[in-house]
Image (spheres, rainbow, N blue to C red):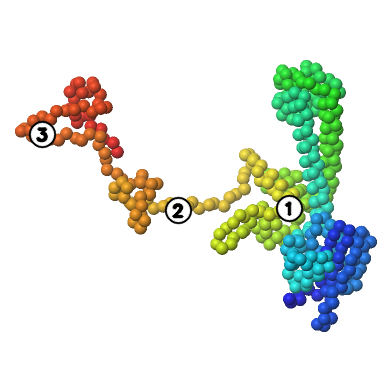
Protein backbone atom coordinates (compact mmCIF):
# COMPACT_ATOMS: atom_id res chain seq x y z
CA UNK A 1 0.00 0.00 0.00
CA UNK A 2 1.09 3.56 -0.70
CA UNK A 3 2.50 5.48 2.24
CA UNK A 4 0.48 8.57 3.08
CA UNK A 5 1.64 9.22 6.66
CA UNK A 6 5.29 9.23 7.68
CA UNK A 7 6.13 7.76 11.07
CA UNK A 8 2.62 6.71 12.06
CA UNK A 9 1.83 5.48 15.56
CA UNK A 10 -1.00 3.23 16.74
CA UNK A 11 -2.24 2.27 20.19
CA UNK A 12 -4.17 -0.78 21.32
CA UNK A 13 -5.78 0.52 24.51
CA UNK A 14 -6.95 -1.64 27.42
CA UNK A 15 -7.96 -0.93 30.98
CA UNK A 16 -4.54 -1.52 32.61
CA UNK A 17 -2.13 -1.40 29.65
CA UNK A 18 -1.67 0.07 26.21
CA UNK A 19 0.34 -1.50 23.38
CA UNK A 20 2.05 0.97 21.02
CA UNK A 21 3.43 0.42 17.51
CA UNK A 22 5.45 2.79 15.33
CA UNK A 23 6.45 2.09 11.71
CA UNK A 24 9.88 3.48 10.82
CA UNK A 25 11.20 3.28 7.24
CA UNK A 26 14.96 3.36 6.65
CA UNK A 27 15.25 3.48 2.91
CA UNK A 28 13.36 0.43 1.72
CA UNK A 29 13.63 -1.42 5.00
CA UNK A 30 10.73 -1.32 7.43
CA UNK A 31 11.27 -1.39 11.15
CA UNK A 32 8.36 -1.70 13.55
CA UNK A 33 8.94 -0.50 17.09
CA UNK A 34 6.73 -2.11 19.72
CA UNK A 35 6.30 -1.16 23.38
CA UNK A 36 3.82 -1.63 26.20
CA UNK A 37 2.95 0.96 28.84
CA UNK A 38 0.67 1.18 31.85
CA UNK A 39 -2.44 3.34 31.68
CA UNK A 40 -1.53 5.23 34.84
CA UNK A 41 -0.50 8.86 34.50
CA UNK A 42 3.27 8.11 34.82
CA UNK A 43 2.89 5.31 32.26
CA UNK A 44 1.06 7.57 29.80
CA UNK A 45 3.68 10.29 30.22
CA UNK A 46 6.34 7.71 29.38
CA UNK A 47 4.32 6.74 26.30
CA UNK A 48 4.19 10.38 25.20
CA UNK A 49 7.97 10.76 25.56
CA UNK A 50 8.54 7.52 23.66
CA UNK A 51 6.41 8.64 20.73
CA UNK A 52 8.08 12.04 20.61
CA UNK A 53 11.52 10.44 20.58
CA UNK A 54 10.56 8.43 17.47
CA UNK A 55 9.30 11.54 15.65
CA UNK A 56 5.64 10.46 15.51
CA UNK A 57 3.17 13.10 14.32
CA UNK A 58 -0.11 11.15 14.03
CA UNK A 59 -1.42 8.56 16.47
CA UNK A 60 -4.48 6.36 16.00
CA UNK A 61 -6.37 4.43 18.68
CA UNK A 62 -9.57 2.43 18.86
CA UNK A 63 -12.63 3.70 20.73
CA UNK A 64 -12.60 1.07 23.49
CA UNK A 65 -15.32 1.94 25.98
CA UNK A 66 -14.08 4.84 28.13
CA UNK A 67 -10.50 3.58 28.35
CA UNK A 68 -9.33 5.82 25.52
CA UNK A 69 -10.24 9.04 27.37
CA UNK A 70 -7.23 9.25 29.76
CA UNK A 71 -4.88 8.39 26.90
CA UNK A 72 -6.45 11.09 24.73
CA UNK A 73 -6.20 13.67 27.52
CA UNK A 74 -2.43 13.13 27.88
CA UNK A 75 -1.57 13.00 24.16
CA UNK A 76 -3.95 15.54 22.60
CA UNK A 77 -1.60 18.54 23.14
CA UNK A 78 1.43 16.95 21.43
CA UNK A 79 0.07 14.79 18.57
CA UNK A 80 -2.62 14.68 15.93
CA UNK A 81 -4.93 12.01 17.30
CA UNK A 82 -7.43 9.85 15.43
CA UNK A 83 -10.14 7.95 17.27
CA UNK A 84 -11.46 5.18 15.03
CA UNK A 85 -14.36 2.78 15.27
CA UNK A 86 -13.18 -0.71 16.19
CA UNK A 87 -15.75 -2.24 13.82
CA UNK A 88 -14.16 -0.47 10.85
CA UNK A 89 -10.63 -1.79 11.48
CA UNK A 90 -11.27 -5.48 12.13
CA UNK A 91 -8.69 -7.78 10.60
CA UNK A 92 -8.82 -11.41 9.50
CA UNK A 93 -10.21 -13.66 12.25
CA UNK A 94 -7.76 -16.05 13.88
CA UNK A 95 -4.92 -13.52 14.12
CA UNK A 96 -6.03 -11.63 17.20
CA UNK A 97 -3.33 -10.42 19.60
CA UNK A 98 -2.59 -7.04 21.10
CA UNK A 99 0.62 -6.68 19.09
CA UNK A 100 -1.04 -7.62 15.80
CA UNK A 101 -3.89 -5.22 16.50
CA UNK A 102 -1.45 -2.36 17.01
CA UNK A 103 0.54 -3.32 13.89
CA UNK A 104 -2.58 -3.53 11.72
CA UNK A 105 -3.89 -0.20 12.99
CA UNK A 106 -0.52 1.42 12.34
CA UNK A 107 -0.42 0.02 8.80
CA UNK A 108 -3.89 1.39 8.05
CA UNK A 109 -2.89 4.83 9.38
CA UNK A 110 0.21 4.84 7.21
CA UNK A 111 -1.89 4.14 4.11
CA UNK A 112 -4.44 6.81 5.01
CA UNK A 113 -7.32 4.34 5.27
CA UNK A 114 -8.64 5.40 8.68
CA UNK A 115 -11.65 7.63 9.21
CA UNK A 116 -11.50 9.57 12.43
CA UNK A 117 -14.49 9.78 14.74
CA UNK A 118 -15.78 13.12 15.96
CA UNK A 119 -14.24 14.15 19.29
CA UNK A 120 -15.23 17.65 20.47
CA UNK A 121 -12.69 20.01 22.05
CA UNK A 122 -12.02 19.98 25.77
CA UNK A 123 -14.55 22.71 26.81
CA UNK A 124 -17.33 20.89 24.98
CA UNK A 125 -16.29 17.58 26.55
CA UNK A 126 -16.44 19.17 30.01
CA UNK A 127 -19.92 20.48 29.28
CA UNK A 128 -20.92 17.05 27.94
CA UNK A 129 -19.91 15.33 31.20
CA UNK A 130 -22.03 17.76 33.20
CA UNK A 131 -25.15 17.50 31.04
CA UNK A 132 -24.99 13.72 30.91
CA UNK A 133 -24.63 13.42 34.66
CA UNK A 134 -27.52 15.82 35.16
CA UNK A 135 -29.63 13.65 32.86
CA UNK A 136 -28.91 10.60 35.01
CA UNK A 137 -29.90 12.51 38.15
CA UNK A 138 -33.16 13.59 36.53
CA UNK A 139 -33.86 9.97 35.59
CA UNK A 140 -33.14 8.85 39.16
CA UNK A 141 -35.56 11.46 40.48
CA UNK A 142 -38.28 10.18 38.13
CA UNK A 143 -37.70 6.64 39.37
CA UNK A 144 -38.09 7.78 42.96
CA UNK A 145 -41.32 9.58 42.07
CA UNK A 146 -42.63 6.37 40.50
CA UNK A 147 -41.75 4.44 43.65
CA UNK A 148 -43.67 7.02 45.68
CA UNK A 149 -46.76 6.46 43.53
CA UNK A 150 -46.48 2.69 44.03
CA UNK A 151 -46.15 2.87 47.79
CA UNK A 152 -49.16 5.20 48.01
CA UNK A 153 -51.18 2.69 46.01
CA UNK A 154 -50.20 0.05 48.56
CA UNK A 155 -51.56 2.24 51.37
CA UNK A 156 -54.86 2.86 49.56
CA UNK A 157 -54.35 6.64 49.51
CA UNK A 158 -55.50 8.10 46.16
CA UNK A 159 -53.86 11.50 46.43
CA UNK A 160 -52.64 11.36 42.82
CA UNK A 161 -56.25 10.99 41.62
CA UNK A 162 -57.14 14.44 43.02
CA UNK A 163 -53.87 16.42 42.91
CA UNK A 164 -52.12 16.72 39.56
CA UNK A 165 -48.68 16.82 41.24
CA UNK A 166 -48.24 15.02 44.53
CA UNK A 167 -44.76 16.55 44.88
CA UNK A 168 -46.08 20.10 44.65
CA UNK A 169 -46.50 22.45 47.60
CA UNK A 170 -49.80 20.99 48.79
CA UNK A 171 -48.93 17.36 48.07
CA UNK A 172 -45.54 17.63 49.75
CA UNK A 173 -47.12 19.15 52.86
CA UNK A 174 -49.58 16.25 53.08
CA UNK A 175 -46.84 13.66 52.58
CA UNK A 176 -44.66 15.23 55.28
CA UNK A 177 -47.64 15.19 57.64
CA UNK A 178 -48.24 11.51 56.88
CA UNK A 179 -44.59 10.67 57.60
CA UNK A 180 -44.75 12.58 60.89
CA UNK A 181 -47.74 10.47 62.02
CA UNK A 182 -50.81 12.51 61.05
CA UNK A 183 -53.40 10.26 59.40
CA UNK A 184 -56.64 12.21 59.97
CA UNK A 185 -58.11 12.94 56.49
CA UNK A 186 -59.73 16.19 57.64
CA UNK A 187 -56.45 17.57 58.98
CA UNK A 188 -54.53 16.46 55.89
CA UNK A 189 -57.09 17.97 53.50
CA UNK A 190 -56.81 21.36 55.20
CA UNK A 191 -53.14 21.50 54.13
CA UNK A 192 -54.20 22.13 50.54
CA UNK A 193 -53.13 25.43 49.00
CA UNK A 194 -54.27 27.49 46.03
CA UNK A 195 -56.68 25.95 43.55
CA UNK A 196 -56.52 22.61 45.32
CA UNK A 197 -58.68 23.96 48.18
CA UNK A 198 -61.66 23.69 45.85
CA UNK A 199 -61.23 19.90 46.04
CA UNK A 200 -61.15 19.54 49.82
CA UNK A 201 -64.18 17.17 49.91
CA UNK A 202 -62.50 14.94 47.34
CA UNK A 203 -59.22 15.13 49.26
CA UNK A 204 -60.88 13.96 52.46
CA UNK A 205 -62.13 10.87 50.68
CA UNK A 206 -58.86 10.22 48.85
CA UNK A 207 -56.68 10.53 51.97
CA UNK A 208 -58.39 7.68 53.79
CA UNK A 209 -56.07 4.68 53.83
CA UNK A 210 -53.95 2.29 55.87
CA UNK A 211 -50.72 4.26 56.30
CA UNK A 212 -48.59 2.03 58.57
CA UNK A 213 -45.17 2.56 60.13
CA UNK A 214 -43.31 0.75 57.33
CA UNK A 215 -45.01 3.01 54.82
CA UNK A 216 -43.92 6.09 56.78
CA UNK A 217 -40.31 4.84 56.76
CA UNK A 218 -40.25 4.16 53.02
CA UNK A 219 -42.01 7.41 52.06
CA UNK A 220 -39.65 9.37 54.31
CA UNK A 221 -36.59 7.86 52.63
CA UNK A 222 -38.02 8.52 49.18
CA UNK A 223 -38.75 12.16 49.99
CA UNK A 224 -35.25 12.62 51.44
CA UNK A 225 -33.70 11.13 48.30
CA UNK A 226 -35.82 13.37 46.07
CA UNK A 227 -34.65 16.42 48.04
CA UNK A 228 -31.03 15.34 47.61
CA UNK A 229 -31.51 14.85 43.88
CA UNK A 230 -33.20 18.23 43.50
CA UNK A 231 -30.24 19.89 45.20
CA UNK A 232 -27.76 18.00 43.00
CA UNK A 233 -29.67 18.95 39.84
CA UNK A 234 -29.64 22.62 40.87
CA UNK A 235 -25.87 22.57 41.48
CA UNK A 236 -25.23 20.90 38.15
CA UNK A 237 -27.46 23.37 36.33
CA UNK A 238 -25.57 26.28 37.89
CA UNK A 239 -22.22 24.82 36.79
CA UNK A 240 -23.53 24.17 33.29
CA UNK A 241 -24.68 27.78 33.10
CA UNK A 242 -21.18 28.87 34.04
CA UNK A 243 -19.57 26.64 31.41
CA UNK A 244 -21.98 27.90 28.75
CA UNK A 245 -21.03 31.55 29.03
CA UNK A 246 -18.70 31.46 25.99
CA UNK A 247 -21.51 29.81 23.98
CA UNK A 248 -24.42 31.96 25.17
CA UNK A 249 -25.06 33.33 21.67
CA UNK A 250 -25.26 29.82 20.20
CA UNK A 251 -27.66 28.75 22.96
CA UNK A 252 -29.94 31.71 22.34
CA UNK A 253 -29.94 30.96 18.62
CA UNK A 254 -30.93 27.35 19.24
CA UNK A 255 -33.77 28.44 21.50
CA UNK A 256 -35.41 30.21 18.56
CA UNK A 257 -36.32 26.77 17.17
CA UNK A 258 -39.90 25.79 18.15
CA UNK A 259 -39.77 23.17 20.88
CA UNK A 260 -36.19 23.92 22.01
CA UNK A 261 -35.90 25.24 25.55
CA UNK A 262 -32.83 26.03 27.64
CA UNK A 263 -31.97 22.48 28.72
CA UNK A 264 -32.44 21.14 25.22
CA UNK A 265 -30.14 23.81 23.80
CA UNK A 266 -27.52 23.01 26.45
CA UNK A 267 -27.57 19.31 25.56
CA UNK A 268 -27.34 20.05 21.82
CA UNK A 269 -24.26 22.22 22.32
CA UNK A 270 -22.68 19.65 24.64
CA UNK A 271 -23.20 16.75 22.23
CA UNK A 272 -22.65 18.40 18.84
CA UNK A 273 -20.50 21.41 19.68
CA UNK A 274 -20.58 24.76 17.95
CA UNK A 275 -18.19 24.04 15.06
CA UNK A 276 -20.33 22.63 12.27
CA UNK A 277 -17.42 22.37 9.83
CA UNK A 278 -16.82 18.79 11.04
CA UNK A 279 -20.09 17.78 9.35
CA UNK A 280 -20.02 18.51 5.58
CA UNK A 281 -23.81 18.49 5.24
CA UNK A 282 -26.84 18.18 7.54
CA UNK A 283 -27.23 14.62 6.30
CA UNK A 284 -23.81 13.76 7.72
CA UNK A 285 -24.91 15.07 11.11
CA UNK A 286 -28.13 13.04 10.97
CA UNK A 287 -26.17 9.94 10.00
CA UNK A 288 -23.69 10.49 12.83
CA UNK A 289 -26.53 10.86 15.33
CA UNK A 290 -28.17 7.72 13.87
CA UNK A 291 -31.53 9.38 13.30
CA UNK A 292 -31.65 8.53 9.60
CA UNK A 293 -32.66 5.13 8.19
CA UNK A 294 -29.97 2.74 7.11
CA UNK A 295 -29.22 1.60 3.58
CA UNK A 296 -29.07 -2.14 2.95
CA UNK A 297 -29.65 -3.25 -0.63
CA UNK A 298 -28.41 -6.38 -2.37
CA UNK A 299 -29.30 -8.01 -5.70
CA UNK A 300 -31.86 -5.33 -6.43
CA UNK A 301 -33.78 -5.98 -3.22
CA UNK A 302 -33.91 -3.52 -0.36
CA UNK A 303 -33.67 -5.15 3.04
CA UNK A 304 -34.20 -3.82 6.54
CA UNK A 305 -32.92 -0.27 6.97
CA UNK A 306 -32.67 -0.33 10.75
CA UNK A 307 -30.72 2.54 12.25
CA UNK A 308 -27.51 1.72 14.09
CA UNK A 309 -26.36 2.57 17.59
CA UNK A 310 -25.32 6.19 17.81
CA UNK A 311 -25.19 8.90 20.43
CA UNK A 312 -28.03 7.88 22.74
CA UNK A 313 -27.94 11.19 24.64
CA UNK A 314 -28.40 13.21 21.47
CA UNK A 315 -31.07 10.91 20.04
CA UNK A 316 -33.12 11.07 23.23
CA UNK A 317 -32.98 14.87 23.24
CA UNK A 318 -33.94 15.12 19.57
CA UNK A 319 -36.90 12.79 20.07
CA UNK A 320 -38.12 14.78 23.07
CA UNK A 321 -38.32 18.17 21.42
CA UNK A 322 -39.51 16.81 18.07
CA UNK A 323 -42.49 15.13 19.72
CA UNK A 324 -43.35 18.22 21.74
CA UNK A 325 -46.60 19.89 20.61
CA UNK A 326 -46.92 23.67 20.75
CA UNK A 327 -50.16 24.85 19.20
CA UNK A 328 -49.50 28.53 20.00
CA UNK A 329 -46.12 28.67 18.27
CA UNK A 330 -45.57 28.69 14.57
CA UNK A 331 -44.25 25.52 13.05
CA UNK A 332 -41.13 25.22 10.97
CA UNK A 333 -41.73 26.00 7.30
CA UNK A 334 -42.20 22.90 5.24
CA UNK A 335 -41.20 22.40 1.67
CA UNK A 336 -44.30 22.17 -0.53
CA UNK A 337 -44.90 18.65 -1.75
CA UNK A 338 -46.28 18.44 -5.29
CA UNK A 339 -49.54 16.57 -5.64
CA UNK A 340 -49.32 13.21 -7.41
CA UNK A 341 -50.55 13.24 -11.00
CA UNK A 342 -54.19 12.24 -11.39
CA UNK A 343 -54.92 9.24 -13.59
CA UNK A 344 -56.66 10.04 -16.87
CA UNK A 345 -60.43 9.85 -16.73
CA UNK A 346 -61.93 7.02 -18.74
CA UNK A 347 -63.83 7.95 -21.86
CA UNK A 348 -67.58 8.15 -21.59
CA UNK A 349 -69.47 5.37 -23.28
CA UNK A 350 -69.31 1.66 -23.43
CA UNK A 351 -71.15 -1.04 -21.58
CA UNK A 352 -70.79 -2.41 -18.13
CA UNK A 353 -68.05 -4.98 -17.83
CA UNK A 354 -66.21 -3.82 -20.97
CA UNK A 355 -62.43 -3.79 -20.58
CA UNK A 356 -61.14 -0.30 -19.81
CA UNK A 357 -57.56 -1.20 -20.67
CA UNK A 358 -57.34 -2.28 -24.31
CA UNK A 359 -54.02 -4.03 -23.69
CA UNK A 360 -55.01 -6.08 -20.65
CA UNK A 361 -58.66 -6.60 -21.58
CA UNK A 362 -59.68 -6.45 -17.95
CA UNK A 363 -62.49 -4.58 -16.30
CA UNK A 364 -61.04 -2.55 -13.42
CA UNK A 365 -63.44 -2.35 -10.53
CA UNK A 366 -62.37 1.13 -9.30
CA UNK A 367 -63.03 2.63 -12.73
CA UNK A 368 -66.39 0.99 -13.40
CA UNK A 369 -68.23 3.75 -11.60
CA UNK A 370 -67.12 6.34 -14.13
CA UNK A 371 -68.52 4.38 -17.09
CA UNK A 372 -71.94 5.39 -18.26
CA UNK A 373 -74.48 2.62 -18.05
CA UNK A 374 -77.87 2.12 -19.74
CA UNK A 375 -80.92 3.03 -17.76
CA UNK A 376 -82.78 0.08 -16.32
CA UNK A 377 -86.54 -0.02 -15.99
CA UNK A 378 -88.37 -2.04 -13.41
CA UNK A 379 -91.45 -2.26 -15.67
CA UNK A 380 -91.71 -2.22 -19.38
CA UNK A 381 -93.71 0.68 -20.78
CA UNK A 382 -97.15 -0.23 -22.14
CA UNK A 383 -97.22 -1.24 -25.73
CA UNK A 384 -99.49 0.76 -28.08
CA UNK A 385 -102.76 -1.00 -28.78
CA UNK A 386 -104.54 -1.01 -32.05
CA UNK A 387 -108.26 -1.03 -32.41
CA UNK A 388 -108.26 -4.63 -33.55
CA UNK A 389 -106.31 -5.95 -30.59
CA UNK A 390 -108.13 -7.14 -27.55
CA UNK A 391 -107.26 -5.41 -24.30
CA UNK A 392 -104.50 -7.19 -22.43
CA UNK A 393 -105.34 -8.06 -18.86
CA UNK A 394 -103.34 -6.07 -16.35
CA UNK A 395 -101.48 -7.88 -13.62
CA UNK A 396 -100.47 -6.28 -10.34
CA UNK A 397 -96.82 -6.31 -9.40
CA UNK A 398 -95.74 -7.75 -6.09
CA UNK A 399 -94.85 -4.33 -4.69
CA UNK A 400 -97.66 -2.28 -6.33
CA UNK A 401 -99.80 -0.50 -3.73
CA UNK A 402 -103.24 -2.01 -3.40
CA UNK A 403 -104.87 1.37 -3.25
CA UNK A 404 -103.40 2.42 -6.59
CA UNK A 405 -104.52 -0.86 -8.19
CA UNK A 406 -107.91 -0.59 -6.72
CA UNK A 407 -108.39 2.89 -8.11
CA UNK A 408 -107.75 1.54 -11.59
CA UNK A 409 -104.76 3.71 -12.42
CA UNK A 410 -103.07 2.95 -15.70
CA UNK A 411 -100.07 0.74 -15.57
CA UNK A 412 -97.78 3.36 -17.01
CA UNK A 413 -98.32 5.53 -13.95
CA UNK A 414 -96.63 2.91 -11.79
CA UNK A 415 -93.53 2.56 -13.99
CA UNK A 416 -90.42 3.45 -12.02
CA UNK A 417 -87.12 4.10 -13.68
CA UNK A 418 -83.78 3.73 -11.93
CA UNK A 419 -80.38 4.70 -13.04
Q: Name the residue under label 2.
A: 341
Q: Which of 257 and 39 is in front in this view?
A: 39
* Quarter that holds the N terminus: bottom right
Identify the residue under disc 1.
311
**Mark 3 and mark 1 in contact (Cβ < 8 Å)?**
no
Q: In this view, does 407 lie to the left or right of 254?
A: left
How many residues crowd mark 2 within 10 Å: few (<14), some (14–19), many (20+)? few
The answer to which of marks 2 and 3 sits earlier in the sequence is 2
Query: Which label sits on residue 385?
Result: 3
Of labels 1 and 3, earlier in sequence is 1
The residue positioned 26% from the left and 39% from the top of the image is 376
Gap between marks 2 and 1 measured at Cα? 41 Å
Tag 2–tag 1 contact (CB < 8 Å) = no
Q: Can residue 173 be seen in this view?
A: no
Above or below 89: residue 263: above
Task: Report the residue at 87% width, 70% height from top.
Answer: 34
Amino acid sequence: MERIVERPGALDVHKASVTACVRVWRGRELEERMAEFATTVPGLLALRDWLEALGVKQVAMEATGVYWKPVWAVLEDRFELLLVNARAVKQVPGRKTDIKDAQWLCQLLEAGLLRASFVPPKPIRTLRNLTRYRKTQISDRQREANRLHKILEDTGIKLDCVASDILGVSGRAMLDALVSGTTDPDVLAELARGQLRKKIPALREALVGRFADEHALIVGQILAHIDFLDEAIDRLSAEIEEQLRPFAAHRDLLMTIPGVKQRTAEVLIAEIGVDMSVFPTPKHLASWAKVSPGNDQSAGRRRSGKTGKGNKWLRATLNEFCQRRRPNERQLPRRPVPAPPRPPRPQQGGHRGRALDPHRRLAHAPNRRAVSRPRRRLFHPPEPRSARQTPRPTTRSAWTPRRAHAQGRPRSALCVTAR
